Image: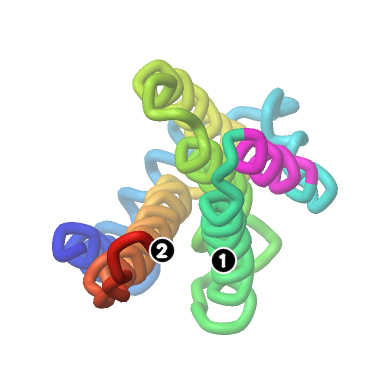
């Protein structure tokens, strides 16, 4: 629990550091934009069109069904809650809390990237509900896929590099908080005194 809390705190701190450096400090803001301009091309992204509200709902259903199939319904609920919290929090922060100029895009503030949050949160939710024996291979595949998504977001000019980094930090923080809360509840249940039954009961 302590490790997860530290991960969450560090991720939250780094999230705001990236936000401030990419939007309010000249040298790092110029570097952020220079990387975008260096990689940016005009074209159609392959993976990014997969992100939509219906696709997120479908992924959520798949996550819950996997957990139910494994007789771990509460694990599915936790994974779904983390997935939903990541996406809702990301949109609230981007649309109502954080402010940044629209140098990179014409849509206004693009920090954090909703597309990156969607992919990363689904990947995390699936990791939570999958059997431990499958997590090693899945982690490698998911990491490669997220790397491609991150590159496409910058390559096609949808987001600055800082937007992508901020999104990953946000998902990491929410995942760590969700994991720490779950671990705390489980430990509390284990520490509860169990009733002593009389012999033969």
Q: Are marks 2 and 1 in contact (CB under 8 Å)?
A: yes
Residue 93 location (% of width, % of height) = 54, 75
Q: Main secondary structure of the magenta part?
A: helix
Is residue 142 positioned above or below 118 on the image?
A: above
On screen, 33 above or below 49?
below
In primary-sequence order, the first of circles 2 and 1 is 1
User: Residue at 75% across / 35% down in the picture?
Assistant: 50
Q: Which of the two residues, 14 or 45, is positioned nearer the viewer here?
A: 14
Between residues 199 and 39, which one lies in front from this camera angle?
Answer: 199
Task: Please report the residue visible at 38 percent of the width from the left and 28 percent of the height from the top.
Answer: 132
Taking the image as shown, residue 116 lies to the left or right of residue 32, namely: right
* Camera sees residue 52: yes
Q: Position of residue 115 (x, y in %)?
A: 62, 47
Q: Which residues are magenta?
A: 58-69
Q: Is residue 62 magenta?
A: yes
Nearer to us in this view, 120 or 74? 74
Query: Residue 22: in sight, yes or no?
Result: no
Q: Is residue 63 magenta?
A: yes
Tell me which corner region of the image, top left, top right, bottom left or bottom right, holds residue 58: top right
User: Disc 2 marks which residue?
Assistant: 178
Eyeballing the image, is 88 above or below 136?
below
User: In the rendered image, which quarter is residue 133 located in?
Assistant: top left
CA distance separating discs 2 and 1 = 10 Å
- Relative side of 190 to 112, left or right: left
Residue 85's label in the rendered image is: 1
Where does the N terminus fall, quadrant-wise?
bottom left
Q: Residue at x 42, y 45 (%)?
A: 161
Position of the C terminus by quadrant: bottom left
Mark 2 burial class by Cα count in 10 Å: few <14, some 14-19, many 20+? many
Residue 131 image label: none
How far from the left and from the top, in percent, is residue 109? 58, 68
Q: Mark 1: which secondary structure?
A: helix
């Amino acid at each position: 629990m302590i490790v997860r809390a530290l991960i969450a705190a560090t991720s939250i701190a780094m999230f705001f550091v990236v936000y401030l450096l990419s939007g309010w400090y000249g040298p790092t803001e110029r570097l952020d934009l220079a990387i975008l301009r260096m990689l940016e091309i005009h074209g159609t992204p392959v993976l990014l069109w997969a992100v939509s509200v219906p696709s997120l709902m479908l992924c959520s259903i798949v996550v819950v069904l996997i957990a139910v199939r494994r007789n771990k319904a509460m694990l599915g609920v936790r994974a779904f809650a983390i997935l939903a919290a990541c996406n809702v929090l990301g949109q609230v922060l981007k649309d109502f809390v954080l402010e940044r100029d629209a140098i990179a895009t014409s849509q206004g503030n693009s920090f954090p990237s909703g597309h990156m949050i969607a992919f990363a949160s689904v990947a995390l939710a699936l990791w939570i509900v999958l059997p431990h024996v499958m997590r090693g291979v899945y982690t490698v595949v998911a990491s490669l896929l997220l790397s491609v998504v991150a590159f496409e977001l910058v390559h096609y000019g949808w987001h600055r590099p800082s937007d992508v980094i901020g999104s990953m930090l946000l998902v990491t923080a929410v995942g760590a908080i969700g994991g720490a809360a779950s671990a705390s509840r489980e430990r509390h249940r284990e520490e509860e005194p169990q009733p002593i039954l009389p012999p033969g009961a």
